[in-house]
Image (cartoon, rainbow, N blue to C red):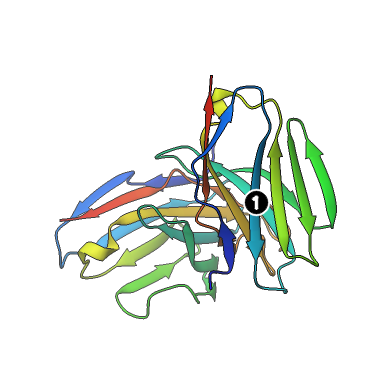
């Protein structure tokens, strides 16, 4: 069983709509959770991190964490074509640099 | 923006050769992490280093792979006797002192073994 699992997609989202990405993790020792965006051929870029149960909002992005269900999600509101990328969910048990990544969900925003 | 610098960006090696990948962390960062991304897969943690110390190498293959972060100079990921299966993107990330500090990724080195 993979430690961090995501649907691979692609997730097709109309421009202006909400993209909803899901992630589950198996290690209950995971403390902090991260969403990275990766454009094709580029490096991962941190969008948000969350470590407390509940919601965390930053601009058009909202991360949600439910530790009891071992579930993390990312909502992207008012999706733009520039949001088309692969979104990587990651978890850490200690250092924020040592991360367990999911395989990523490809998001395609269609005009 | 003096971010995490990796070089070379692209590296082609024949089977059996050695590959050396370099990573210069961001200014003020003393922690370095190496990741490997195989085609169509997520990033896999390889090794965590601080200056002159390997902190965690639980993700490193047992053979042919080694990493260092000397007191002076960049961190080096070394792959000896490369095989086709080593073809991947290798990313380096760096962070400041302390466990709960964001790690920033470099642009990666794309290794192709022919």
| Closer to the camera in the image, B37 or A95 | B37
Relative to the observer, which residue lies in front, A89 or B16? Answer: A89
> How many numbered marks have been drawn onto this rendered protein structure?
1
User: Would residue A35 be visible to someone looking at this image?
Assistant: yes
Label 1 sits on residue: A22
Q: Position of residue B5 (x, y in %)?
A: 46, 44
- Where in the figure is residue A85, as x and y percent of width and height? 51, 37
Horizontal side of B38 relative to B80 (left or right) equals right
* Residue B100 image-quadrant placement: bottom right
Answer above or below: position of B52 versus B32.
below
Helix, strand or loop at mark 1: strand
Q: Residue at x 48, y 43 (%)?
A: A43
Quarter where residue B62 is shown? bottom left
Residue at the extreme bottom: B62
User: x, y (%) of residue B111?
Assistant: 28, 53
On screen, residue A16 above or below B82: above
| Residue at the top extreme of this rendering | A111
Q: Crowdedness of circle 1 by 10 Å Cα count: few (<14), some, many (20+)?
A: some
Residue drawn where x is 72% and y is 73% of the image? A28
In the displayed structure image, the side of residue A55 where residue A16 appears, left or right: left
- A94 or A86, which lies in front? A86
Report the chain holding disc 1: A
On the image, the x and y values in percent for residue A27 come to: 66, 73
Would you say residue B1 is visible in this rendering? no
Q: Is residue A82 above or below residue B17?
A: above
> Residue at horizontal 73%, vertical 30%?
A60
């Amino acid at each position: 069983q993979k430690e961090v699992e995501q649907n691979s997609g692609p997730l097709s989202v109309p421009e202006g709509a909400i993209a909803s990405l899901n992630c589950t993790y198996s290690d209950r020792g995971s403390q902090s959770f991260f969403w990275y965006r990766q454009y094709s051929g580029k490096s991962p870029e941190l969008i948000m991190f969350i470590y407390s149960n509940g919601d965390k909002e930053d601009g058009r992005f909202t991360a949600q964490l439910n530790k009891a269900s071992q579930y993390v999600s990312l909502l992207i509101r008012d999706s733009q074509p520039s949001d088309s990328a692969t979104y990587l969910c990651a978890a850490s048990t200690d250092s924020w640099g040592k991360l367990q990544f999911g395989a990523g969900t490809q998001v395609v925003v269609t005009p | 923006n003096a971010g995490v610098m990796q070089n070379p960006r692209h590296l082609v090696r024949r089977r059996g050769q050695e590959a050396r990948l370099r990573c210069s962390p961001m200014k003020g960062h003393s922690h370095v992490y190496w990741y490997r991304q195989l085609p169509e897969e997520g990033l896999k943690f390889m090794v965590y280093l601080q200056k002159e110390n390997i902190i965690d190498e639980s993700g490193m293959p047992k053979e042919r792979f080694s990493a260092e972060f000397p007191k002076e100079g960049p961190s080096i990921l070394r792959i000896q006797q490369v095989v086709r299966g080593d073809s991947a993107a290798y990313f380096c990330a760096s962070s400041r002192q302390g466990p709960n500090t964001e790690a920033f990724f470099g642009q990666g080195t794309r290794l192709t073994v022919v």
